Amino acid sequence: MGLAEYKRKRDFKKTVEPAGKPLPKKVKGASRFVIQKHAARRLHYDFRLEMEGVLKSWALPKGLPWKRGEKHLAVEVEDHPIEYEEFEGVIPEGQYGGGTVMVWDRGTYYVFGEQPLKSLREGKLHLVLDGKKAKGEWTLVRIRGRDGEKNQWLILKTGDDAKPPSKKLEDQSVKTGRTMKQIADARDAEWQSNRLEDESPTSQFKARIREAIKKKSKR
C-alpha cells in the first residue's frame, strides 16, 4: 500500500503527525507493534504492525478481545510511517483523524508461519503479541464486507484468555504515563501559551513594526 494514501489525507503544515518515509523493505528485527487509543469522532484503537518498512494498520472500534473465541471488527486503513509508533499528542480539529492520540500499548510480535506478507495477502495473520498490556495470541482474518470491500477484518482472541488491563492502565500511556485528558490538556496549554505570547505588548509592538515596514516597501 505504501504511504501515498496516508500523505494524501493530511496537511503536514497543520498536523503534528510525522510525514515519514518508507524504510528499506528488509529491516533486521522489524517486528514492532503499537496500539494507539484515538479519540477522533468516535473513540477507537489503532492497531499497527511493522512490516515492509511501514506500519500496516487497522482501526479497532472496540479494541482487542480478551477472552478466547471473542472477535471484534478490525477495519484495515492506510499504511502509516514507522515514526508514527512514537506519536502521542493531539491532531488539530479539521485535520484527518482530528483528536487526542495515546500510545496505549507497544512491544514486539511475530507471525506463525514466519511469512507475514504472505499471510497478510492471504487474509489471515496468526499473531503472538508481547506488549506491556497485550500478551498472547490473536488472529486477524479478512472477511467479505459490503459490496466486496476488502478492508473488513475480524480480530479474534486465540490461544488462552488474556488479562485485560485494569481501569487505571486502560487510560494510561505506556510511553508517558499520561491519561487522555492530560494529553489533551497539554495541547490546550501549549495553545494558550502561544496565544498569550502573540497577545503580549512586545509581540504586538513587533507586529506593528513589521506591518509598517511592509507598507513602506510597497510604496
Image (tube, rainbow, N blue to C red):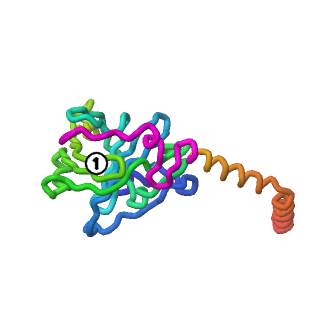
Viewer-side residue, 193 vs 157: 157
Residue in the picture at 28% in, 60% down: 31
Viewer-side residue, 53 vs 36: 36
Q: Alpha-carbon neighbours of circle 1 within 10 Å: few (<14), some, or many (≥20)?
A: some
Q: Which residues are magenta?
A: 158-183
Viewer-side residue, 23 vs 109: 109
Q: Mainly helix, strand or loop, the magenta region?
A: loop
Tell me which corner region of the image, top left, top right, bottom left or bottom right, holds residue 67.
top left
Q: Position of residue 128 (x, y in %)?
A: 23, 50
> For this view, does 114 lie left or right of residue 17?
left
> For this view, does 171 lie left or right of residue 165?
right
Which amino acid type is shown beneath numbered disc 1?
Answer: Lys
Residue bearing mark 1:
135
Residue in the picture at 26% in, 36% down: 149
Q: Position of residue 98 (x, y in %)?
A: 52, 43
Tell me which corner region of the image, top left, top right, bottom left or bottom right, holds residue 210.
bottom right
Residue in the picture at 46% in, 34% down: 42
Task: Assess whether residue 162 is covered by the magenta stretch.
Answer: yes
Rendered-image quadrant of the C terminus? bottom right
Task: Assess whether residue 170 is covered by the magenta stretch.
Answer: yes
